[in-house]
Image: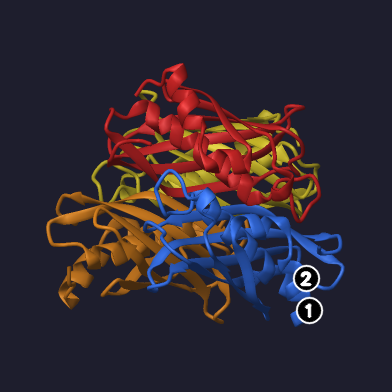
Chain colours: A blue, B red, C yellow, D orange
Amino acid sequence: MRFSEADMKRLNDNTVYRTVGIEVTMAEGGEAMSRLRPNPELCWPFQGQPHGGVLATLMDTTMAWTVLTVVDPGYNCATINLDIQYTRPARGDLTCRSRVKHSGGRIVYTTADIHDADGRLVATGQGTFRVIREPAP
Amino acid sequence: MRFSEADMKRLNDNTVYRTVGIEVTMAEGGEAMSRLRPNPELCWPFQGQPHGGVLATLMDTTMAWTVLTVVDPGYNCATINLDIQYTRPARGDLTCRSRVKHSGGRIVYTTADIHDADGRLVATGQGTFRVIREPAP
Amino acid sequence: MRFSEADMKRLNDNTVYRTVGIEVTMAEGGEAMSRLRPNPELCWPFQGQPHGGVLATLMDTTMAWTVLTVVDPGYNCATINLDIQYTRPARGDLTCRSRVKHSGGRIVYTTADIHDADGRLVATGQGTFRVIREPAP
Amino acid sequence: MRFSEADMKRLNDNTVYRTVGIEVTMAEGGEAMSRLRPNPELCWPFQGQPHGGVLATLMDTTMAWTVLTVVDPGYNCATINLDIQYTRPARGDLTCRSRVKHSGGRIVYTTADIHDADGRLVATGQGTFRVIREPAP
């Protein structure tokens, strides 16, 4: 699928992204990028650091977008598995970059990295998705 | 560490758990249980289903509590890696059960399952934690 | 599928299992067990300890058998992903127990533990398999 | 650590690599490369395809070498966890490339890809290692 600017705007406008602080900024040709402006309410137990689950949410989301760029219209995807490595304490605004490593038709393999504003890797992961026949949101 | 009822109450009273809908109900002897009452704002893109990142948050949280039960006071833990398998669509209230599989001193290995109210497995995972010298919250 | 004693004998008689030292001893109803008698040639770099890849082979193998017990005849399986946690140094003969945690039709989720002769957990893992239309070996 | 040509030759000369068909061809500055010439005895159950455990062995091995390039002499490493995604059937000679993504002192995070002779990705993974005080082999 291809996402127009209007699509991006509409798809970013949902309660999950607003609550967590996610904005997907690019999704095209098997790649996607997103930004996290951490919600202070989701920074616990380490002050100023988003909960590990927030990073998982950011990663899963960004990976799913890369998958959507390689499936046909009328299809969506669901996560089979997500493996995250937490490399450093995550502070401040973060960016996530993901790309499809292989699309095997009904199963798509992705990877993603999350960096902080100073370019330090704070988390890295890989995810597998199955393609399902159901309109994307 | 041992958690009194008062500890449990105090530790459950934080902005992450309130926003996500988590309550840790038991943590003792290398095991922990928790409950998720999904926040509707975090149910997207599949209606009525918490985002995969919410399940990751629930799992990571519950695993961390099992780790805290096996470390000495004055120590906390940080996730090294979290591997989640998403087995079924997750609907309604959920419960998570986790236990320590091995504590190797500075590295602790855990596993967790998330079930729905009908006892169906909706996600399963394993997590590795490092023990850090820093008071738990 | 159901495996007769003759099936088990025939399936165990292959060059991979002989080289690595694997014997599958039970496979039924979503569960499987196997035994590893480590090949000394595959114990390196730590003396007397099978290489981590040998444990991965044992685990992947045993998981695949659990999958075969829940698919119809004429189907086989291929690993999508395998996540292993290495908990302790592995010495001497080992046993692996695996079970299906969820079978979602074309995707099957499994878990496995490897113990040594003293009952200590030396590795634990989870694996996802896709079911393929192709006769099992 | 830095590996001389003589080190590489000596370290490649072990029974695991000979049995499996592995040769590490480069290890320097947080990166490593290796080659697999599959042992036909380890190609089962899919003819001409090395067992998934062989790919795990290749990946774990190559990752460990990248770790050794970033630790001081007198230290070795042990795998904490290994997460592999199997993307395509693996046929013929294979190459594995790995690199350190983050070295956090006692814990080192790595990633690796395995390609076939036509440059197709057949497996990808991430691994975490702990650094141990013990001479490398």
- Label pair 1/2, CB-CB below 8 angstroms: yes
D42 in relation to A62, above or below: above
Tell me the residue that label 1 is attached to. A6
Instruction: Look at 67% across and 64% down and name the residue there.
Output: A64
What count of labels does the image hold?
A: 2
Q: Depth check: A3 or B84 in front? A: A3
B105 in relation to A92, above or below: above
The answer, for residue A2, to whether it is visible in the render is no
The amino acid beneath tag 1 is: Ala
D92 in relation to A46, above or below: below
Residues packed near mark 2 inside 10 Å, few (<14), some (14 to 19) or many (20 plus): few
The amino acid beneath tag 2 is: Arg
The answer, for residue A55, to whether it is visible in the render is yes
Q: Which chain carries label 2?
A: A
Which quadrant of the structure image shows residue A97? bottom right
Q: Is mark 1 on a helix, strand or loop?
A: helix
Q: What percent of the width, then of the height, locates residue B56?
A: 58, 46
Q: Is mark 2 on a helix, strand or loop?
A: helix
Q: What percent of the width, then of the height, locates residue A135?
A: 86, 63
Q: Depth check: D60 or A118 in front? A: A118
Instruction: Look at 62% across and 46% down and name the residue there.
Output: B54
Q: What percent of the width, then of the height, locates residue B60?
A: 51, 42
User: Is the C terminus of chain A in the top left, top right, bottom left or bottom right quadrant?
Assistant: bottom right
Tell me the residue that label 2 is attached to. A10
Q: Depth check: D86 or B112 in front? A: B112
Which quadrant of the structure image shows residue C93? top left
User: Which residue is farthest left?
Assistant: D74
Q: What percent of the width, then of the height, locates residue D116?
A: 53, 75
